[in-house]
Image (cartoon, rainbow, N blue to C red):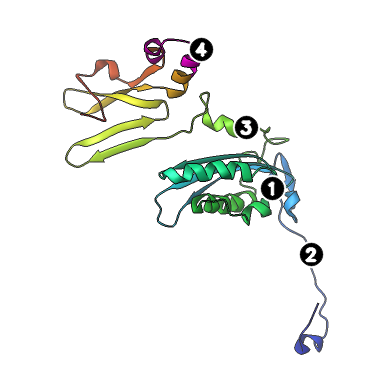
Amino acid sequence: MIYSQEVQHMCVVKKGPNHGPAPIPEEGKWVRSKEIKDISGLTHGIGWCAPQQGACKLTLNIKDGIIEEALVETIGCSGMTHSAAMASEILPGKTLLEALNTDLVCDAINTAMRELFLQIVYGRTQSAFSEGGLPIGAGLEDLGKGLRSQVGTMYGTKAKGTRYLEMAEGYVTRMGLDEDGEVIGYEFVNLGKFTDFLKKGIKPEEALEKSKGSYGRFADAAKYIDPRHE
């Protein structure tokens, strides 16, 4: 350690209290974290690119400072999906600090990593009060049974009103309108279920019908429209 002449000529003033860092909740325990290996938990981070054309939701399951599981979800930019593919291969096995200082291919994913770091080092995790934390594989539970991201896609104009394109339940095929032309429900196809039925050898027409559902007062609608073409 090199000290300047000014510091060398100073007298020593002894340090008083040294109570350490404040504890943070981690997997059902209170931990005074001092090193990266002291960090554990499952948490999320949201990131965006500089022109804000796309966004990323990053979910990491970290045990003793090591990333054991990564879920990378992107929206808004076609190129980001390829970046997410690479990031899902890059992240597992790295330390939290190593991942923070790694180029994850896409600016939105890098930003999500930064935001996730700020969450987890302060104990803001989904598993903060879960004894032993969440098992590896818990990240997939965010996707639901069909293992597809929860995406909502809606469009609206002043002239023609709203169009529901995709809900968490699936791809919207029809919207139901009442006598006043207001939305009262919608019909959807769960693409995850549809694909699973096809894999089982069910005919496409039957698989499509079995994958359909509706929400709201769809059956009572006075008029039905295709939100993509009407």
Q: Identify the disc placed on residue 18.
A: 2
Residue 2 at x, y percent in the picture: 79, 80
Give the mark toward the camera: 4 or 2: 4
Q: Is residue 167 left or right of residue 17?
A: left
Residue 218 at x, y percent in the picture: 29, 19
- Return the disc, 1 or 4, that comes first in the chain's sequence: 1
Identify which amino acid the numbered label 2 is placed on: Asn
Q: Is residue 151 left or right of residue 225?
A: right
Q: Residue at horizontal 62%, vertical 42%?
A: 89
Give the magenta part as a residue range.
196-208
Give the mark toward the camera: 1 or 4: 4
Element at label 2: loop
Dominant SS of magenta comes to helix
225 or 206, which lies in front?
Answer: 206
Inter-mark Cα distance, 2 to 3: 38 Å
80 or 69, which lies in front?
Answer: 80
The residue to which callout 4 is attached is: 200
- Return the disc, 4 or 3, that comes first in the chain's sequence: 3
The residue to which callout 1 is attached is: 94
Inter-mark Cα distance, 1 to 4: 38 Å
Identify which amino acid the numbered label 4 is placed on: Lys
